[in-house]
Image (cartoon, coloured by chain):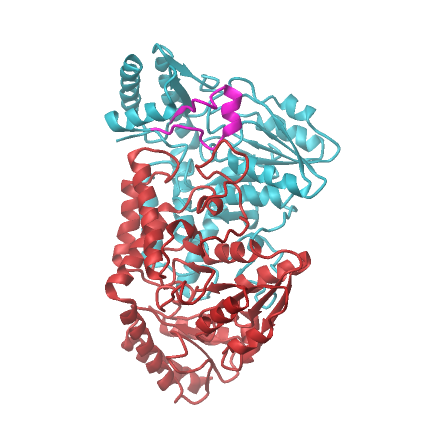
Chain colours: A red, B cyan
Amino acid sequence: MVYFDNAATTFPKPEIVYETIMTAMKEYGANPGRSGHKMALKASRGIYETRELLGKLFNFNHPMNTILTFNATEGLNIGIKGTLKAGDHVITTSMEHNSVLRPITYLEKFGVENTIVYGDEKGRIKARDIEKAIKKNTKLIVTTHVSNLTGTIMPIEEIGKIAHANNILYMVDASQSAGVYNIDMDKMNIDLMAFPGHKGLLGPQGTGALIIREGLSPCEIFQGGTGSDSQSLIQPDILPDKYESGTENAPGLIGLGAGIKYILQRGMDNIRGHEEDLTKHFIEEALKIEGIKLYGPLNPKDQAAVVALNIKDADSSEVSYILDQEYDIAVRPGLHCAPLAHKTIGTLEQGAVRFSFGLFNTHEEIEFALKALREIAKEL
Amino acid sequence: MVYFDNAATTFPKPEIVYETIMTAMKEYGANPGRSGHKMALKASRGIYETRELLGKLFNFNHPMNTILTFNATEGLNIGIKGTLKAGDHVITTSMEHNSVLRPITYLEKFGVENTIVYGDEKGRIKARDIEKAIKKNTKLIVTTHVSNLTGTIMPIEEIGKIAHANNILYMVDASQSAGVYNIDMDKMNIDLMAFPGHKGLLGPQGTGALIIREGLSPCEIFQGGTGSDSQSLIQPDILPDKYESGTENAPGLIGLGAGIKYILQRGMDNIRGHEEDLTKHFIEEALKIEGIKLYGPLNPKDQAAVVALNIKDADSSEVSYILDQEYDIAVRPGLHCAPLAHKTIGTLEQGAVRFSFGLFNTHEEIEFALKALREIAKEL
C-alpha cells in the first residue's frame, strides 16, 4: 500500500514512537498527576517532557502554558470560544478547516461577529486583506498556517505583525505545519497555537496541544478533576490544570514526545527538504498529464506537501476509489472539512483528490502514483 | 510493585489490549471516517465495533448514540452542560467526583440551580433523599454509580425509577463501575451515562464514552470537522458526529474494544466475584489492625473494590509515601478529586489512603499490603 494521506494522519510513525507508547503502557501505565507513587510520577514526568519538547520546537519556554489536548479541535475550540465574547469581532479566512469555521459560526448566535477573508484561486491569503478587515471591536485573528486542501503556506509572520500592531490576539492553526515548518511563537507574534500530535509531529492519534502565550488565560471549556486544588468546586485557575480536566492520554502524549525527539534528531529542515522534493517531483510530472487539473501555488516554496487535483470532470471520490482499489494508493477525496477553501478554488461540487506526502514516502512511490494517474486520466 | 491504584486507572491491561492497539497503529493507523481508502475504512470499522461492544455490555442497541470520548470528564461535561439551561434545577450528591461537581457549580453563574444531597457517614445516598430534593424545575439528576472514595454502590435503579416517574432526566457517572457491575440502560431508566475506557473496561487512557438515550440530543460542546455534511458551517445534528469533532483516538478506541471483548469472554460476574473476594479479605483483616480506621460500607455487597482508610492521625500522603517507598505498594492519598465525599465521611483534613483492587490483583498481594499496614500502624 502507498500511503498518501499524511495530511489526515501521518503513517507510519517512527518505530521509536510505537515502542515508547508500549513501554509507557506496560511499564508505567499509571494515571499521571493523580497519585504520588513511583509509576504515577514517572508518567507525569514523561508528559512534562513532552511539554518541554514542544517548547523547544516552537521557541516557547513556558511548559505550563503548553496545554496538552486530545486533538487540534479541542485546542481550537478553547482558543476561539475561550477568548471571544458578545460584541467581539473575529477575522478568519476562507482557507480554514471546519474546526475553525464551525466554532466561529457557532459564536454568531452569542453575538460574536466575524469576517471571513477570501483567498485567491491558489488559496493564497494576503495579509493586507486581513488588515483591511480589522474593526474597532476586532479581538482575534485566526488563520491556518498551511491549507489542508491546497497546501498553501500562509504569511503568518506578516499577519502576526499586523495583529500585534493593532493589539489584536493572533491564533494559528498549525495542524498541517507543526513538526515540518519553523514556527517561532515569539518572533511571529503568535498568541495561541493549536495543533494535533498525530500529523507532522509523528505522535499517535488522541494527542494534540494548545500553546497559550504567557499572561493570557482564555476561559476553559471543561471543568473536572485536575488533581489540584481538589477541595474547591471551582475549576483552578492555574495552567495547565485549568484546561486539562480528567485523565489524559498519558501513553499517547509520551509517544508524542518520542515523535518530537525523532524530528529534532533527524532535523526538521531535512524532513521538510525531503517533503519539498517529493512535492516538487509530483507537481512537475503531474502537470504534464493531460486532463489533470492541479490546485494550489504549485511551487514547493509556497506549498506544503499537500497537492489537490482533479481528473477532467470525474468526481473526486471516483478517482480516489480507483486509486485505492486498483493501485492500492491511499488518498482522500471530497471536501476535506474545508468547504470555503473548495469554494475559493472552485471545487465545491467536484471535491478534490488530495495527495499528501510524508517523511516516509519515496520518489518511487511518487512515480508509481504518477503512472496510475496517467492511466486513469487516459481511461476516464 | 503491587498496584492498588485501579480506581485511577487499571493496570496492567490484558495482553490482547496492548497487542490490538499496536496492530491498529502499525497496520491500519489511518484516520477513521475521514477518507474512503481501505486502511481508513478498517479503522472506522474497528471503532464501530467498540460502539457495538459497549451496547452489548449495557443493553443498549443504538451504536450511533454511543458517543466515543477521550475520557469520562468530556462525557460528563456534555451530558450536564448540554442538557441544562438557565432556570433549570439539577440534583446531585456529595459523593460525586469533581468532574460532576465542578461543571454543576460552573453552571450556577448561568442561572442553573443545584441541590447536593449528602450521603451518610458510610457514603450511602438514600434514593428517598433525592426524591425529596425534586422541585418543579428539576431537569436532571446526576449521580455516580460507585463512589471513587469509599466504593459505596449507589441505588441507581431506584433513583432511575424516581427520575422516570417525575419526568426528570437521569445521568449516571459509571467511572468506577463500567465493566465490573451490571448496568442496564433500559431497565434502570438511565438517560445519559458517561465513563472512561481505561478503568474497569480495561482499555487504554485517552478513551471514554457517553451513552445518550435515543431521542435525546444535548447541545454539543465542541464544533469542528466531522467528515460529514462538510459543506455546512453548522455542526451536523446527526449522532455520533455531533459530539465527535476532530480526529478520534482510533487505536485507543479499538484497544478499548479488545478490553470489552476480554471482559465478555472472562465474564463480568467472574471479574466482579474476584474483586469482591479481594475486597472482603482486605476489609476483614484490616479491621483487625489497631490504629486503622476504615471508611465506607465495609461489606462487599455494598462496596466496590475501593477501600479508603487512615492510620491514626497520620496524613494520608505520609502513609502512601511509606507504602510506595518502603513496600513498593502503589495507592492514592489525598482528596481523590472528591471534596464533598471527604466532607461526608469526615476526612477533608486528613485525606484518605485509597486502596483500589483490580482483576489482576491477588490474595498474596492483599496479604502483603496487610503486613505493611500492620507494621506502619505499629510505627506511627
A5 in relation to A71, above or below: below
Q: Position of residue B103 (x, y in %)?
A: 57, 40
B159 in relation to A258, above or below: above
The residue closer to the viewer here, B166 or A311, is: B166
Identified at 47% across, 21% down, the residue is B347
Residue B123 appears in view: no
B168 in relation to B122, above or below: below
Q: Position of residue A27 (x, y in %)?
A: 27, 41
Describe residue A222's horizontal placement relative to residue A157 as left or right: right
Describe residue B160's horizontal placement relative to residue B333 as left or right: right
Magenta stretch: residue B146 in it?
no
- Please identify the quarter of the rendering in which residue B266 is found: top left
First to last magenta residue range: B331-355
The residue closer to the viewer here, A355 or A86, is: A86
Q: Position of residue A71 (x, y in %)?
A: 45, 55
Describe residue B116's horizontal placement relative to residue A122 as left or right: right
The residue closer to the viewer here, B274 or A338, is: A338
Q: How many marks?
A: 0
Residue A9 appears in view: yes
Magenta stretch: residue B334 in it?
yes
- Please identify the quarter of the rendering in which residue B278 is found: top left
Identified at 25% across, 31% down, the residue is B1
Q: Quadrant of the N terminus of chain A?
A: bottom left
Q: Main secondary structure of the magenta part?
A: loop
